[in-house]
Image: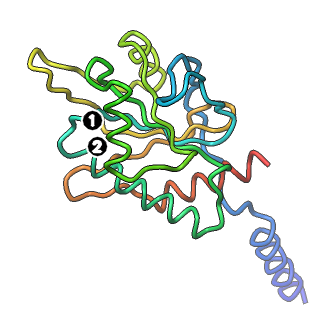
Amino acid sequence: MKFFAFTILLIGGILAIYFFWPESTSLPKMGTVTDWELTEVGTEEVPAHDKPKLITFFYTNCPDICPTTMIDLQNLQQSMEDEGITEDQYLIVSVTLDPAYDTEERILQYKEAFGISSDNWLFLRGSEKEIRGFTKSFNFVYEKNKDGFLTHSTSMYIVDSKNQIRSIHDMAVGDKKVNTEEILHHFMQLIKEAE
């Protein structure tokens, strides 16, 4: 009799854990982005940042990592749409690391070359000092040598609607593509969290 009661309690406990355990744990808070003094290319206004966003860095002369990442992020947008997530629920924010070369006109040409026309994909630029300040929020490292060649970290960052950094992802490097499935999952968590 005691064994039967113990078995019933054990099964009941397992079922309770199964049904009431959260689907996923909350993403950690790894810092806050406070410096948004950059300007969106094509407008004079600083865009609203009150929704989950993926922050990525690029420069238009980048020969490999940046262009392949742009293509993967277009695939991410399609995956988001396939999951029923609309463009007004999240942002992709691409910040140039080379404002001296990447004029507004060059960035607009870059967007056009990739066929990027989504309203929720923002391209930002600012002064060298403003960009250095912004990258410090992420501990993102980059350097331009005397020949104008730029080397940079290969991380991207998901930031929530309160501008807290919540996850870090890799750009496309070599044969390794962006993990769009993981980014999609993290976006879905933060969109649900913001509701």
Percent x, y of residue 138: 45, 27
Q: Point out the residue furthest to the top here.
A: 129
Residue drawn at (42%, 53%) of the image:
73
Labelled disc at residue 154: none
- Characterize the local packing of mark 2: few (<14), some (14-19) or many (20 or more) Cα atoms within 10 angstroms: many
Position of 133 with respect to 101 (left or right) is right
Q: Quadrant of the N terminus?
A: bottom right
Q: How many marks?
A: 2
Q: Nearer the viewer, residue 20 or 149?
A: 149
Task: Write down the quadrant of residue 98 in the picture.
Answer: top left
Which residue position is annotated with label 1?
60
Q: Would you identify the image quadrant in which residue 51 lies?
A: top right
Left or right placement of residue 153 versus residue 14 in this view: left
| Label 1 Cα neighbours within 10 Å, binned few <14 / some 14-19 / many ≥20 | some
Estimate the x, y position of residue 32 in percent, counting from the top left: 59, 25
State yes or no: discs 2 and 1 in contact (Cβ < 8 Å).
yes
